Amino acid sequence: DAGVTQSPTHLIKTRGQQVTLRCSPKSGHDTVSWYQQALGQGPQFIFQYYEEEERQRGNFPDRFSGHQFPNYSSELNVNALLLGDSALYLCASSLNPSTNEKLFFGSGTQLSVL
Amino acid sequence: QKEVEQNSGPLSVPEGAIASLNCTYSDRGSQSFFWYRQYSGKSPELIMSIYSNGDKEDGRFTAQLNKASQYVSLLIRDSQPSDSATYLCAVRISGGYNKLIFGAGTRLAVHP
């Protein structure tokens, strides 16, 4: 049973560039959430996708956008990268956002913006 | 205003001792509480969940919840050097579907 998988594992970009991160949820899960974790901080909620729609959004600018595909996988896009976007980006999957389900995290994508 | 607060540590305990990690939260309507363990450079791993007041035990781990005091804790008995990690407290906020709010984490160091 495959867990949550993310790609790539590491990424180096320069300011102003755009980046796309990918996530495949755990088998049987239909909801994907994205979190940003800066060094020394806890994960911060970016947004959540269910039924191919953004259901909730955290306090992140419009430069952060996402998508969910029919197979439940998801992408996180960040435009016009800033130095402050350097962080570990975590994808978490669960079953149905309205139920009391546990979140399981992928191994993350470490993004460095130079 | 932070919604979930933890002492950043480091909390240093000798091998075999009990480590006690604490967390407070501000949303009185929260119903679900989680402890994640995160090793350096790795992703968070769920180790405990608790939904009702009282204690919940799983192996060497015990989670304690007091909703009246808005307080949740994690006890690790017989601490091992392999328990050295950052422990993240997470709260599912009321009305927030499956959105978790995390504390900044407490770094635990277990020394031989």
Image (cartoon, helix red, strand yellow):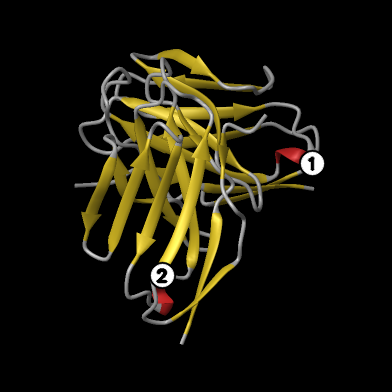
Q: Is residue B56 left or right of residue A109?
A: left
Secondary structure under tag 1 reads helix
Q: Is residue B93 left or right of residue B77?
A: right
Question: Could you say which quadrant of the image residue B5 lies in?
Answer: top right
Identify the residue at horizontal 70%, vertical 44% (top origin). A86
In the picture shown, does residue B104 fall above or below A27?
Answer: below
- Nearer the observer, B75 or B106: B75
Find the distance from the CA under tag 1 to the CA under tag 2.
Answer: 33 Å
Residue B97 in the image: state x and y as whole percent.
38, 19
Residue where numbered disc 2 is placed: B83
Residue where numbered disc 1 is placed: A83
Identify the residue at horizontal 62%, vertical 56% (top origin). B8
In the picture shown, does residue A35 fall above or below B23?
Answer: above
Residue A83 in the image: state x and y as whole percent.
79, 41
Residue A56 in the image: state x and y as whole percent.
48, 16
Identify the residue at horizontal 38%, vertical 14% (top origin). A52
Identify the residue at horizontal 39%, vertical 48% (top origin). B35
In the picture shown, does residue B14 fall above or below A54?
Answer: below
Secondary structure under tag 2 reads helix
Tag 1: residue type?
A: Leu
